[in-house]
Image: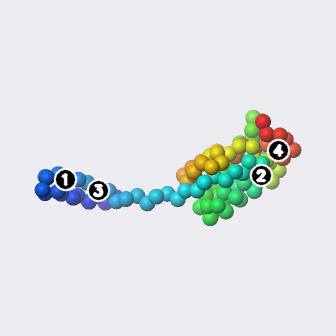
């Protein structure tokens, strides 16, 4: 990263300026509660134009079951919450249960 040294000779002060960092793109998390897990993942990818392509999921029953077919799981919670802003560096996690179960 290059720095630029600017000298203000009238007051005898030197200031180091850094280049402005470009803003990271951000989006608003939609309400995906009640959707199947695959649909929720697809919605995030579609919203971000594929920029955010990974989201995690957690079995909300506490049993730690593997999600092999994402369409067989329903979203109970999302982190970040619906309406919150997220960026490419935000960890996205959906709390899920089997589609035959009720959210805790």
Q: Position of residue 11 (x, y in %)?
A: 13, 52
- Whole-angstrom CA distance, mark 2 to mark 1, is 57 Å
Question: In the shown orientation, is residue 11 left or right of residue 78?
Answer: left
Question: In the shown orientation, is residue 42 left or right of residue 16?
Answer: right
Please state, as top left, top right, bottom left or bottom right, where the C terminus lies in the image: top right
Q: Which tag, 2 or 1, sits closer to the chain's start?
A: 1
- Whole-angstrom CA distance, mark 3 to mark 2, is 48 Å
Q: Which tag, 1 or 4, sits closer to the chain's start?
A: 1
Q: Which tag, 3 or 2, sits closer to the chain's start?
A: 3
Q: Disc 2 on helix, strand or loop? A: loop
Provide the residue designation for mark 3: 17
Q: Which mark is residue 14?
A: 1
Look at discs 4 and 2 and give the one toward the viewer. 2
At x 82% / y 44%, what residue is drawn? Answer: 98
Q: Disc 3 on helix, strand or loop? A: strand
Residue 21 visible in the current orientation: yes
Provide the residue designation for mark 4: 98
Q: Nearer the viewer, residue 63 or 98?
A: 98
Number of numbered markers? 4
């Amino acid at each position: 990263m290059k720095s630029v040294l600017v000298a203000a000779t009238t007051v005898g002060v030197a200031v180091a300026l850094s280049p402005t960092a470009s803003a990271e793109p951000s989006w608003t998390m939609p309400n995906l509660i009640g959707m199947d897990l695959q649909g929720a993942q697809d919605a995030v990818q579609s919203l971000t134009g594929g920029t955010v392509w990974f989201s995690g999921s957690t079995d909300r029953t506490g049993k730690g079951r593997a999600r092999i077919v994402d369409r067989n799981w329903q979203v109970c919670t999302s982190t970040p919450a619906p309406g919150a802003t997220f960026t490419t560096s935000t960890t996205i996690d959906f709390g899920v249960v089997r589609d035959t179960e009720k959210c805790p």
